[in-house]
């Protein structure tokens, strides 16, 4: 069997799958061992997966695809065999704990999660001493049995009613209704693999004025106002779980995705839900830049104890856009200390970023590997139905219901992210208000005239090649040539990157348009330029100029 078969399969999968899915599920896997299948004609690919959550998800979502690709590349039927990597296998095999008193709400959530990925929770359980953030002494006694148990949830075949109960989170009761609502929402969100149509969870008829409280949380960003859909299904389910039982599974929770897709909204939602259940919880939301500022301030004043006191005592730290830590060594060191201290006392950490942990540049590996040690989930751009649901929900929250056909029209034309969708909706509502007209497709078209004309202006690969060639003063023919000097190869890679970013063309199609190059060459260029863009401001500026020129 060719030793690079797995590598080639990964390249093929990277070209075929949405980038975020590939980066989340396939890329972090260790290479599969591929051998002849004893007694059979074919081969078997053994893949070790770090935890059961991933194992179940890969099995249900991607195993057929992986098998097909391997079979095609190997030229013989290739079967995929998924096993747990040793550490987690041990964790799963650990004896089940003495059941704590069943908490019905937690059981519902356990059931919901079991339906997402059977036994996910068990595999992701925090080390054996997992202990919820107990607030009252009585609760603490109940929370920490003599031998602290590993968390346990029903496995796939266990009926919910007879399942070993999940150890209940011990936040004070008193918010049963909210919890039930959140849990019901979890059940609703946790219905893959069949891609459920998104549902508007709830929308108040009047806009809730946003308030930033002392936890730096925006009180308007809740699970209720977050529309659920396939794009945020995993992230939302995991976040709901953390809100219901912090300090246990999925710690740290690392959420990544492109701009304006709801990462910040989701982390605020966790904080708000937790405080709703337990107003005394020590929760802090902050943007990574605020942490950097804090470190600098305390460094100048030499008040490190204050810094420690502030962060190390938290129950839940929500930190947004950790990619901003790039190149900030002192900050990374302080964050590392806070991170270790919080995890040691079973406080929960949720981070967001624009890329997956291993894709972070200029951040120490001891940090990025820790970022990846809990659960890493992506939020993807919403699909059409979800965009429609978001528009309807937001319009209703503004007190101005939007006709469905108008919502479809806007959703079809505004695809980039939710922030842009909100902007388009605001324009339509304002236009209707000021012109005293009914909201119709005609009105929406008028209101979004500028935006639509930009969208409609097609950007072709040929146009990108010409614009980039002009910009870097090379010949257009060099875009197709085999020449390799850096002065030519780099603009060519930039043009390939822009072709992937700005057109709907696939990697093989782009390769073809660049002188019949292989799709892996394009993939390499896309990743290289995309990665460099994050840390090289000059390149980033050049790309912005090119993008603006092309978009017109
Ligand atoms: N699923 C959703 N349902 C309702 N609103 C959403 C959803 N996703 C995003 N939004 C809204 O879109 C806007 C942008 O979301 P948010 O700021 O959370 O994005 P982000 O991923 O953190 O972006 P950035 O990386 O730029 O910080 C917010 O107003 C948020 O409330």
Image: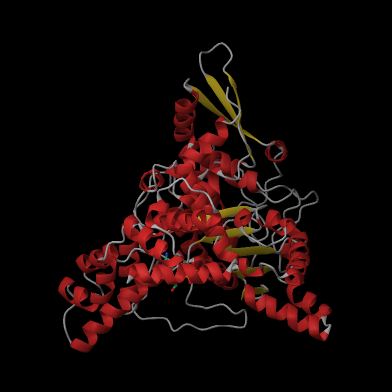
Dividing the picture into quadrants, the one containing residue 468 is bottom left
Rendered position, 288 above or below 459: below
Q: Nearer the viewer, residue 244 or 486?
A: 486
**Quick check: which quadrant has ligand 1?**
bottom left
Residue pictured at 54% horizontal, 45% vertical: 25
Image-based side of 267 in relation to 97, left or right: left
Furthest-top residue in view? Answer: 39
Rendered position, 399 above or below 185: below
Question: Looking at the figure, which quarter contains the C terminus?
Answer: bottom left
Residue 189, horizontal then vertical, whole percent: 44, 55
Image-based side of 113 in relation to 293, left or right: left
Residue 245, horizontal then vertical, whole percent: 62, 59
> Does residue 488 show up?
yes
Q: Nearer the viewer, residue 150 or 19?
A: 19
Colour pattern: secondary structure
Residue pictured at 51% horizontal, 17% vertical: 42
Label count reads 0
Residue 377, horizontal then vertical, whole percent: 54, 54
> Does residue 261 show up?
no
Image-based side of 56 in relation to 362, left or right: left
Rendered position, 406 above or below 378: below
Image-based side of 457 in relation to 140, left or right: left
Question: Looking at the figure, which quarter contains the N terminus?
Answer: top right
Residue 38, horizontal then vertical, whole percent: 59, 14
Q: Nearer the viewer, residue 80 or 19?
A: 19
Q: Nearer the viewer, residue 169 or 114?
A: 114
Residue pictured at 44% horizontal, 60% vertical: 474
Dividing the picture into quadrants, the one containing residue 503 is bottom left
Dividing the picture into quadrants, the one containing residue 204 is bottom left
């Amino acid at each position: 069997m060719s030793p690079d078969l797995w590598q080639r399969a990964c390249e093929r999968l990277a070209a075929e799958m949405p980038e975020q899915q590939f980066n989340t599920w396939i890329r972090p896997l260790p290479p599969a061992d591929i051998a002849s299948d004893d007694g059979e004609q074919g081969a078997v690919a053994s893949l070790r997966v770090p935890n059961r959550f991933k194992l179940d998800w890969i099995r249900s979502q991607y195993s057929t695809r992986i098998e097909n690709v391997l079979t095609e590349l190997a030229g013989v039927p290739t079967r995929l065999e998924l096993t747990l990597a040793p550490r987690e296998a041990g964790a799963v095999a650990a004896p089940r704990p003495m059941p704590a008193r069943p908490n019905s709400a937690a059981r519902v959530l356990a059931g919901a999660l079991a339906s997402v990925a059977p036994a996910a929770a068990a595999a992701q359980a925090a080390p054996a001493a997992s202990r919820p953030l107990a607030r009252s002494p009585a609760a603490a006694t109940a929370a920490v049995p003599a031998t602290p148990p590993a968390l346990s949830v029903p496995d796939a075949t266990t009926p919910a009613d007879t399942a070993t109960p999940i150890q209940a989170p011990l936040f004070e009761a008193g918010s049963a209704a909210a919890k039930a609502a959140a849990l019901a929402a979890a059940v609703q969100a946790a219905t893959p693999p069949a891609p459920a149509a998104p549902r508007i969870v709830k929308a108040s008829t009047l806009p809730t004025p946003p308030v930033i409280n002392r936890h730096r949380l925006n009180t308007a960003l809740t699970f209720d106002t977050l529309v659920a859909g396939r794009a945020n299904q995993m992230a939302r389910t995991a976040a709901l779980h953390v809100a219901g039982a912090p300090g246990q599974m999925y710690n740290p929770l690392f959420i990544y995705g492109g701009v304006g897709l709801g990462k910040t909204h989701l982390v605020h939602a966790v904080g708000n839900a937790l405080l709703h259940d337990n107003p005394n919880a020590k929760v802090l939301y902050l943007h990574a830049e605020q942490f950097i500022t804090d470190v600098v301030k305390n460094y100048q004043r030499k008040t490190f104890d204050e810094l420690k006191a502030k962060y190390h005592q938290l129950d839940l730290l929500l930190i947004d856009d950790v990619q901003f830590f790039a190149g900030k060594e002192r900050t990374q060191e302080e964050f590392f200390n806070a991170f270790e201290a919080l995890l040691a006392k079973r406080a929960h950490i949720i981070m967001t970023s624009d890329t997956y942990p291993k894709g972070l540049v200029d951040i120490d590996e001891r940090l990025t590997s820790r970022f990846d040690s809990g659960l890493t989930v992506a939020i993807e751009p919403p699909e059409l139905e979800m965009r429609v649901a978001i528009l309807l929900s937001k319009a209703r929250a503004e007190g101005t219901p939007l006709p469905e056909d108008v919502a479809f029209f806007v959703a079809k034309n505004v695809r980039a992210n939710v922030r842009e969708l909100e902007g388009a909706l605001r324009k339509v509502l304002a236009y209707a208000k000021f012109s005293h007209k009914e909201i119709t497709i005609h009105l929406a078209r008028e209101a979004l005239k500028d935006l639509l004309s930009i969208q409609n202006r097609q950007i072709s690969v040929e146009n990108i090649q010409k614009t980039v060639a002009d910009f870097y003063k090379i010949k257009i023919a060099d875009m197709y040539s085999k020449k390799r000097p850096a002065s030519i190869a780099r603009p060519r890679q930039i043009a390939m990157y822009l072709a992937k970013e700005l057109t709907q063309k696939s990697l093989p199609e782009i390769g073809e348009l660049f002188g019949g190059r292989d799709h892996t060459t394009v993939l390499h260029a896309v990743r290289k330029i995309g990665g460099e863009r994050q840390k090289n401001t000059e390149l980033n500026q050049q790309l912005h100029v090119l993008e603006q020129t092309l978009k017109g």
